[in-house]
Image: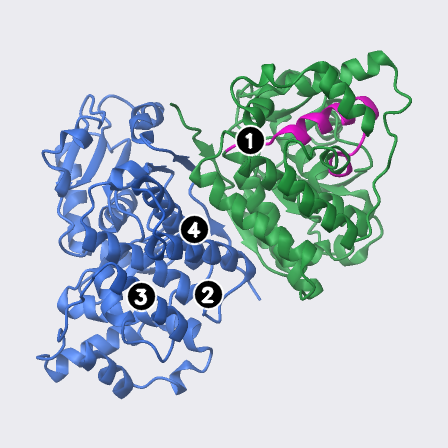
Chain colours: A green, B blue
Amino acid sequence: MNYKNYPMVSRVVFGRNSFDQMGDIIEPKRLNTRAPFIFLVDDVFKGNVWVTSRIPLAYEDELIYVSADEEPKTSQVDELVEQIILTHKDRPSGIIGIGGGTLLDLAKAVAIMLTNEGEAKDYQGWDLVKRPAIYHVGIPTISGTGAEVSRTTVLTGPDKKLGINSDYTPFDQVILDPELTKDVPKDQWFYTGMDCYIHCIESLNGTYLNEFSKTYGEKAFELCKTIFLDNNLSEEESQDKLMMASWHGGMSIAYSQVGIAHAMSYGLSYVLGTKHGIGNCIVFDHLEEFYPEGIKLFKEMKKKHQISLPQGLCSDLEDYEFSTMIDVALALEPLWENALGKHWKQKITKDKLKALYQKM
Amino acid sequence: MNYKNYPMVSRVVFGRNSFDQMGDIIEPKRLNTRAPFIFLVDDVFKGNVWVTSRIPLAYEDELIYVSADEEPKTSQVDELVEQIILTHKDRPSGIIGIGGGTLLDLAKAVAIMLTNEGEAKDYQGWDLVKRPAIYHVGIPTISGTGAEVSRTTVLTGPDKKLGINSDYTPFDQVILDPELTKDVPKDQWFYTGMDCYIHCIESLNGTYLNEFSKTYGEKAFELCKTIFLDNNLSEEESQDKLMMASWHGGMSIAYSQVGIAHAMSYGLSYVLGTKHGIGNCIVFDHLEEFYPEGIKLFKEMKKKHQISLPQGLCSDLEDYEFSTMIDVALALEPLWENALGKHWKQKITKDKLKALYQKM
């Protein structure tokens, strides 16, 4: 048995307004005045002075707004890298991602592709990255994805939706400021929070589970229950707790694996472009057979927060589309093995998956 | 408000028998064949082939047995550094500490002192270390101290008992193999486990508490309750859980602070040489006034495991000894502030401390 040697985030700050420490933290990492910091910022913050005025731009530093309306793509990473190389004489001092999972994953991928040749799609997979990334910082503004602690960066490429999993992927620095999540719209708060909740369910019910993963997963699960089902939390407490749930939930899957909801959600996203958070929810809603207890609580949470999920997403799909969806999902073998054990291929069929997708 | 920017352990492996992965993990870090790995190993493992035969010695590598009967000293660090420098032509490729908190703290301190001038005592305090340490690996063989995740290395110097707290202190690599703890004697298992339990109580009841620390502390606290009060765990489960409790408890105090038991235990240790684990228990047993709930459970745990603590340790002490003890304890200002708030000096007096010590 060979256990993972997990690369952790190098440094972490936690606290309300810790966002204001960013300047002090990154400045010592400036290589020279021509080597800029590139801030990749979710474009929902365009014009939001409360956030943008606190981003410490100096010398050649550049702020690039990026839309998170779509899932991040390998081509988008390549374009950002090209733009950065063409605009600046020196290689950047660092990349700072400010946003949700999309922005964090883009920041990680851009930092990697600035030192590694070729295209981002060449690195989708496990341990294909050859050279250390440049210094990169993650600042989540929505909680749940766990992208802030993971060694992956999930990207949609021309052939597949798959992360760049590598020891060079994790952030050198994470700043956890729960206050940055205060304006997240309610539905997005729910979907992204459920990403974390589903991480816990998939990790805790997986065959890859070990005590390391379990302790993180149990804590994140408990926090999710408190956040989404208790009535006694203040807004601030709820923000603080969800940011920590995301962190611990991320650590839990980092040292085990996700499961069926994630595998099927990747298929949905690849074919229909469905965003990860809502896609997970749409899939998870139909997985009673696999995660009965987890889904019971999920339905309670949905009801309590009056969330109605889209229906009939797959009702007009062609056979070839189902086929692609199913192939993308089934290609994620570790996820199925975690969920169903070594003999998972005997337990799940393409027809079964099609029947599930048809309900969505 | 300025929050800590906490340096995390760079890499971690968890699993039974993960100890066998050590060779594969450290070998890529070998600088050259003359730059040895130095293994600092608790001398309880002398002659224990189950452990020693699995330590991958090559080239000029050296295994140094160290007794953990006494708390680690700055002079001991200096002697080890001198011995290593005199024996080997090249600076070591790395230091690997295998043992409990004492060995882990020695490994961290030796790794620091191999690149920093002067004596270890010069670096007792906060952020006094100038240069990065050499590569250092921690492999705990007893669970509870949290030394495997902390940015300190607690040492008794000529003037004080105080850690070398620095960003260069945390391990580059930790290997968590719960099986290595299987032969720990019961009393030591209890005392060191209680170090973790007390970390949780002091962190969760401290004024420095924040949601980051809280989530780690709550999980470690819950694990301790399960380990020390439930009857349903197998030996293996108990070992796995205690190793994780130590890890999370360490993270909890890392991002907050310990409290009165630790402050007073340092005094006891400085004057009487009392080991940290048992010292904490002796002190904690008399702190009902400060941690009523925590001590109630502690007494249940003690009873369940038929632990009888030494009595009358301080009964023959001279006044000047009490005085030193109290001064050492009170010098740890952050611990008192965490426990009692900003105005802690108005809440605790030397007489009060003396009265408490006299009961021990």
Q: Which residues are magenta?
A: A256-279
**Disc nearer the start of the sequence (3/2):** 2
Relative horizontal placement of residue A234, taking residue A210 as reference (left or right) = right
**Residue hosting label 4:** B248
Q: Nearer the viewer, residue A277 or B98?
A: A277
Indicate the position of residue B234 as horizontal and vertical percent values: 33, 42
Query: Which disc, if any, is residue A75?
Result: none
Mark number, residue B204: 2
Residue at left offset 65%, top offset 18%: A348
For marks 4 and 3, give the CA distance. Answer: 23 Å
Q: Quadrant of residue B298?
A: bottom left
Residue A20 appearing in the image = no
Crowd rating for badge 4 (residues with CA inside 10 Å; few <14, some 14–19, many 20+):
many
Task: Give the residue displayed 52% in from the left and 56% down from the top.
Answer: B215
Residue that carries the numbered disc 3 in the rendered image = B300
State left or right for residue A130 relative to residue A161.
left
Q: Earlier in the sequence, mark 2 or mark 4?
A: 2
Q: Are marks 2 and 4 on the same chain?
A: yes
